[in-house]
Image (cartoon, helix red, strand yellow):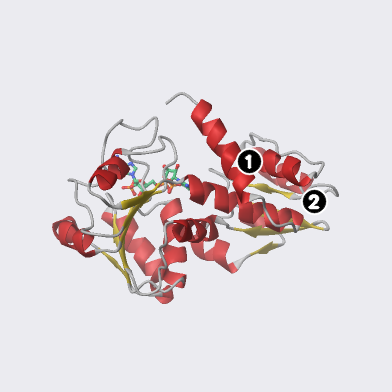
Amino acid sequence: MHNAAFRHLGIEASYQAWDIPPAELAAAVARLREPGVYGANVTIPHKLEVMPFLDEVSKVAKTIGAVNTIVNRQGRLLGTNTDAVGFSRALGDVGVRPAGISAVMLGAGGAARAVAYALLTAGVRLLLVYNRTPARAERLARDFAALGAIAVVPTSELPICIGAADLLVNTTSVGMVGSKGDDLPLPELWLPRQGVVVDIIYRPSRTRLLREAQAAGLTIQNGLPMLVYQGAESFSLWTGEQSPARAMLEAARLVLESLPS
Ligand code: NAP
């Protein structure tokens, strides 16, 4: 999608995948300081470990605990995180304005921290977190308590909390290609009575959770808009240009459709 954006704007640049072992991280980051390099994305396992090699880390990246974007500003490297912006913008596409709503979030991993940041800073009335490993949900709730009303929900109260929620977000990897096929990220199929269900998984394009939610008449969204919008935000930070999000979405969709399911 980034190469599509470069082509769309007539910028002579290319986006490349670098497979960097942990021992070579410092050297790889140093190469980003060169003139002519816009920056980079960072993914597992370097999202936290990269921080000491940067000149500045944004507040959002520190709070989320992960850098996903590095921007080269004349040899100075800024680390930030665009997942929360990406998630917020994606919510807008399905008409969700988080201020004042109640949300249930499934999962407490890295992506959950970006989603929690986005929802709490946008003013959700209450964010309830459910995770297979409750201790991780407790940790997330503690880390984000200063940003707004967040609490961990036990399994016994989950059906009633989901039923009353305006928004249900799956941030777990359950249902993703490569995981156990048709599994649900919940002990049972519990859905909101009305509102929106988002699954930030983008492969497959519709997880079982989304298919069931759609069959129940709820509005659904998969993870592709979040993926594209986080990329669009990174692209703007690198180039200073307005990102061609539609061209990026089409490019990403074409690639995903060409992959085996
Ligand atoms: P992560 O840090 O490894 O967290 C994984 C989460 O899934 C944890 O909450 C984990 O629970 C839960 N989980 C895993 N297997 C489970 C199972 N069998 N039953 C119940 N819960 C299970 O991963 P991540 O980086 O947050 O990514 C999570 C998903 O989000 C992935 O599918 C990824 O592709 C997607 N994602 C999408 C975007 C986007 O832009 N759309 C961005 C980032 C991530 P425990 O704590 O109990 O292990």
Residue at position x 30%, y 57% in the image:
135
Circle 2: residue type = Arg
Location of ligand 1 given as a quarter of the image: top left
Picture coordinates of residue 127, whole percent (x, y): 33, 67
Residue at the farthest right position = 35
Q: Which residue is mark 1?
A: 1
In this rendering, position of residue 259 left or right of residue 31:
left
Mark 1: which secondary structure? Answer: loop
Circle 1: residue type = Met
- The answer to whether residue 105 is seen in the rendering is no
On the rendered image, what quadrant is the C terminus found in?
A: top left
In this rendering, position of residue 221 left or right of residue 63:
left
Mark 2: which secondary structure? Answer: loop
Residue at position x 40%, y 34% in the image:
204
Image disc number at residue 33: 2
Picture coordinates of residue 217, whole percent (x, y): 25, 50
- The answer to whether residue 55 is seen in the rendering is yes
How far is mark 2 from mark 1, CA to CA?
A: 23 Å
Image disc number at residue 91: none
